[in-house]
Image: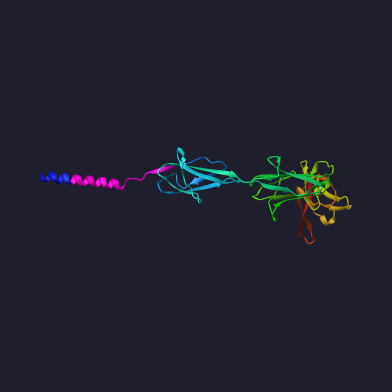
Amino acid sequence: MKQLSKVLLVSVIALVAVLGFTACFKSTPTYAITKSAAEHGSFTVSKAKAKEGTVITITPAANLGYHLDEINVYKTGDVETTITVTSANKFTMPAYAVTVVVTFAQDAANAITLASTENGSFDVTVDDESAEEAVHGTTVTIVTEPDTGYGVDEVTVYNTDLPVQALSVTDNGDGTYEFMMPNFDVTVCVTFVTYYSISLPNMENGELCVQSTAKAGAEVVITADLDTGYTVEWLKIWNTIAAEMVFDSTLEENWGWEWDGSFTFEMPGANVDIWAETGEKKFPMLVTMFFNNGAGEYLEYSMELLKRY
């Protein structure tokens, strides 16, 4: 009997210990945090689920041209039950699942002013439509229209309120230019100058390639599309107003000049005529000769000649 009592006592104690242990380690429930899809931006939350009382941080990231408008947190399935979000974009997790909604709004448009100009005109467009304003982050295109005999000299875009703050402008190479609209008003300035003509010769066995006009001081690059086995034998550039050579490959000062596939010159303030002639390519040939010095010895002499293909 005493032995049975001891067994029962030990069993009761063990049962109490197990129940107590289980009670001590009973887990605290966590609740899901659902992110609603956002437009014109994105956001993250510090946890996907959390216990009651946990501080949750929301980190929004607006797309270019947009800014954070509002953050709302409500009980999932019950939009009327909302949770307070602090100015630091934080909220305290309640004892139920929640949904987070973040909205972004478009930035206000900034004004684009066109400075007056002469010898041409220009306009600015956004998505191929003429524009007087644009939102931060928008690509703005400048379309230029020079008068006959003129071309673009310079394109500048600057802060209307702070002219020393200039923006980067990209030359598209087709008379249009682009810049990214900043978050302030801008002024666009385009100046035009006289462009002078460049005339090319009629050549056999190929042709020279160059732009048709250029402003004074511009670097002009001449290239060539030549028949196989031919090169430019000589090249001359004539200033039609000053009646003088800009470049002449046949002059003594240019002795040794060879066509290497292109030639660059500085455009004078005048129309220019380009003259040139093609010829067969040549390649170096080493010729070695031996001379008797009269003393029974032969001296070796080598020289490089040019031979046509």
In the visual, does 75 lie left or right of 39? left
Q: Nearer the viewer, residue 191 or 237?
A: 191
User: Which portion, as a residue range, is magenta?
Assistant: 10-32
The total number of labels drawn is 0
Instruction: Report the residue at 48% width, 43% height from top.
Output: 73
Q: Position of residue 82 (x, y in %)?
A: 46, 43
Question: Taking the image as drawn, is residue 31 in sight?
Answer: yes
Q: Position of residue 163 (x, y in %)?
A: 71, 55
Q: Position of residue 171 (x, y in %)?
A: 72, 47
Q: Is residue 263 magenta?
A: no
In the visual, does 140 lie left or right of 19? right
Question: Taking the image as drawn, is residue 276 in sight?
Answer: no
Q: Position of residue 2 (x, y in %)?
A: 11, 46
Instruction: Report the residue at 23% width, 46% height from top.
Output: 16
Q: Nearer the viewer, residue 20 or 87?
A: 87
Could you tell me which quadrant the C terminus lies in? top right
Structure colour scheme: rainbow
Furthest residue in direction bottom, as rendered: 295
Q: Is residue 13 magenta?
A: yes
Q: Nearer the viewer, residue 93 or 252?
A: 93
Q: Nearer the viewer, residue 198 or 298?
A: 198
Magenta stretch, overall SS = helix
